[in-house]
Image (spheres, rainbow, N blue to C red):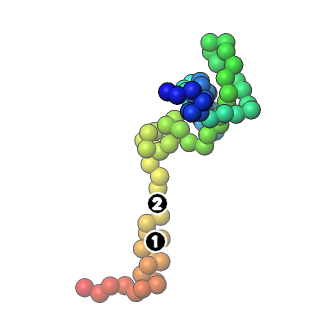
Amino acid sequence: MKPGLHPDYHPVVFQDANTGATFLTRSTATSERTTVWSDGRTYPLIVVDVTSDSHPFWTGAARLLDTAGRVEKFERKYGRRRP
């Protein structure tokens, strides 16, 4: 890579705001907040809303939808279809 052209790519700790899970990776993101990792070094800490630790797709947690209420609302608005 050419020097001075690319952003600084360095180790960063990301923390899931929902579960508190943390992981160390490399990123160009920066933060004023820091944390001490298990190796004893201090790294920038970036808190994010969703990671693979809390996302429903990765955790397998299904969300229940109120489909009956939606169907009733549709039928009230447009009428019930007659066979």
Towards the viewer: 54 or 11: 11
| Residue 78: percent from left, percent from top | 42, 85
Name the quadrant containing residue 46: top right
| CA distance for labels 2 and 1 | 9 Å
Q: Which mark is residue 57?
A: none
Residue found at x 43% / y 66%: 67
Residue found at x 62% / y 12%:
39
Residue type indicated by callout 1: Arg
Judge whether residue 3 can be spotted in this image.
yes
The dot on residue 65 is 2
User: How far from the left and from the top, in percent, is residue 31?
Assistant: 70, 33
Tag 1: Cα neighbours inside 10 Å, few (<14), some, or many (≥20)?
Answer: few
**Rendered location of residue 50, percent (x, y):** 56, 42
Asked if residue 28 can be seen in this view, the reply is: no
Front-most of residues 19 and 24: 24
Q: Does the residue at mark 2 contact the one at mark 1 (Cβ under 8 Å)?
A: yes
Q: Quadrant of the C terminus?
A: bottom left
Disc 2: CA contacts within 10 A as few (<14), some (14-19) or many (>=20): few
Q: Amino acid at mark 2?
A: Leu
Q: Quadrant of residue 13?
A: top right
Q: Point out residue 9 in the picture as x, y percentages from the top left corner.
A: 57, 28
| Residue at x-position 60% and y-position 30% | 4
Among the 4 quarters of the image, the one containing residue 28: top right
Q: Nearer the viewer, residue 30 or 64?
A: 30
What is the secondary structure assignment of the residue under circle 2?
A: loop
- Extreme residue in the right direction: 32
* Image height of 32 relative to 78, above or below: above
Left-right relation of 34 to 22: right
Q: Which residue has dot 1 on it?
A: 70
Q: State the SS at label 1.
A: helix
At horizontal 60% and vertical 43% (from top left) the residue drawn is: 49
> Farthest residue toward the top?
39
